[in-house]
Amino acid sequence: MEAKMFCYQCQEAAKGVGCTLKGVCGKESHTSQAMDLLLFVVRGVSTVADSLRTAGEPENDEVNKFVIDALFCTITNANFDDESILKRVDKGLELRRILIGQASVLGIKLPEVDELLWSGDRSEYETKGELVGVLREANEDLRSLKELIVYGLKGMAAYLEHAMRLGYSDTSVHAFIQYALATIATKSLPADEWVGLVLKTGEYGVKVMALLDEANTGNYGNPEITEVNIGVGKRPGILISGHDLKDMEELLKQTEDTGVDVYTHSEMLPAHYYPAFKKYDHFVGNYGNAWWKQREEFATFNGPILFTTNCIVPPLPNAEYKERMFTTNATGYPGCKYITQDENGKKDFSEVIEIAKSCAAPTEIEHGTIIGGFAHNQVLQLADKVVDAVKTGAIRRFIVMAGCDGRMKSRDYYTEFARMLPKDTVILTAGCAKYRYNKLQLGDVNGIPRVLDAGQCNDSYSLAVIALKLKEVFQLNDINELPIVYNIAWYEQKAVIVLLALLSLGVQKIHLGPTLPAFLSPNVAKVLVDTFHIGGIGTVESDLELFGLV
């Protein structure tokens, strides 16, 4: 059967190779083609913007916002709405036309590439989308390196958009993203220079995560050790999913004194760790588990669900909760109400609140508490205690188990790995991977919990900061001399930028699972293995032995 699409950007790529008929994520082939076309247009916009910037022209905020939003909406499980994607294509083509006009007036010669020459209308979008996807690059290794960069840029864009919504930005990051996209569109480079651009992407990934950390803590305070309720109250509720803390803040403000409670789901759990949100009595707790369980958990929640970012799992045809789904920012789903922001960046959640008032209270699916809030500032306050535990041998190893969760049965590996770890080990985690083991009751070491949750996937930055601080405390020359093992799960492109960021910091011997990325060609994978000693996972027993934990 002829392939209708090709996508291999996430861990669930069909047969470990790529989705060709429909995405395992639920993405239809026509949606994939719309995204390919949008990325084609983004490369064109970035190419002109990069040429204008090189010529000394001032930053264009509209371009910066467009590129970031467009990249973000193509992340796995973020947007399934063709029309919202194609409207972005329309906007990009108009923006490109304006930029080309500016370059012409200034006498700037632009590259003669398809990304700048093609000017089709809506009737040609589908045909063009079929031609400009991943497979447009015939060389497998160059394709692998280019897509590795693009997926890193997508993750970077996600984190940068969150920072921008909180009033923080960095022109150097925008410049790099557009430069990298322009390079992909216009340059023919040897493989080693593409590898260099991959590593440069990781360097900027560190900058972006540091910027978002500053934005989050600057607005909401430093995360602190917090016990989070996983039961329910008796009032109706709104469930907020995703990563955007600005939306979290606005929703809490607008639901105050309405008789409606607010619950987090999946990656929004760490919102409970920020001091600024603790003043809201109606901020009840976290409902459920990782993103992939939402079909069953959204049905029992009973109230409306607000998606601020990925991950959306397409509802089953008979799912009643679809009528209560709302999307915003880069997310979209056909038939679901999209919440826009006004000229001041504010959103009106009144419709969500009114629907919630008519709903039953959530059905309890578990009860008790879980603990988190171990971002770098909090852990560094415990530094003396941690160092003493290491020096006395009470803590033998830290195990970084950050990253993503997913649906595959193979991910049970991470639950069993955590369960079988010796009691003198401590897990450092961030991202939704934590749901594989954060309810196991693994105990503590001298009062230090054996699962230290730093927060969202972007808070993997905290884990790097902690490692660098420990390197300094123990007076080591190399971060890889620390008693830290990296056994990271991945799913989508934000995990890619976290990986590249860690590599740029010199971290080696990272084990990645449950499978290595399909977009790594054998030769590119060999470069990563030979240079950074990246590896896959085996069985729990063999890996515990490999890591010296038996």
Image: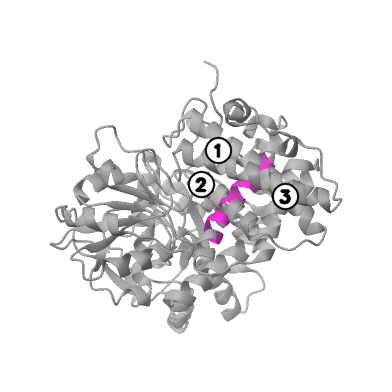
Q: Which residues are magenta?
A: 144-160
Q: Quadrant of residue 6?
A: top right
On the image, the x and y values in percent for residue 354 come to 22, 56
Dot 1 crowding, Cα within 10 Å, few <14, some 14–19, many 20+: many
Give the mark nearest the N terminus, 3 or 1.
1
Picture residue at 63% right of the left edge, 60% below the top: 61
Q: CA distance from mark 2 to mark 3?
A: 22 Å
Query: Which residue is tagged 3?
Result: 99
Mark 3, other Cα within 10 Å: few <14 / some 14–19 / many ≥20: many
Residue nearer the viewer, 18 or 429? 18
Contact? badges 1 and 2 (CB < 8 Å)? yes
Q: Is residue 524 visible?
A: yes
Query: Is 487 displayed left or right of 137 in the figure?
Result: left
**Mark 2 neighbour class, 10 Å CA radius: few under 14, some 14 to 19, many 20 or more:** many
- The image position of residue 204, as x and y in percent, is 65, 61
Q: How many marks?
A: 3
Q: Residue at x 69, y 51 (%)?
A: 198
Q: Where residue 344 appears, x then y in whole percent? A: 48, 66
Q: CA distance from mark 1 to mark 2?
A: 8 Å
Circle 1 residue = 35
Q: Amino acid at mark 3?
A: Leu
Residue type of the residue flagged with mark 2: Cys
Q: Main secondary structure of the magenta part?
A: helix
Q: Is residue 72 left or right of residue 522?
A: left
Dot 1 or dot 2, earlier in sequence = 1
Q: Is residue 152 magenta?
A: yes
Q: Amino acid at mark 1?
A: Met
Image x and y of residue 550, in percent:
43, 57
Q: Nearer the viewer, residue 114 or 281?
A: 114
Of residue 427 and residue 35, the one placed in the foreground of this image is 35
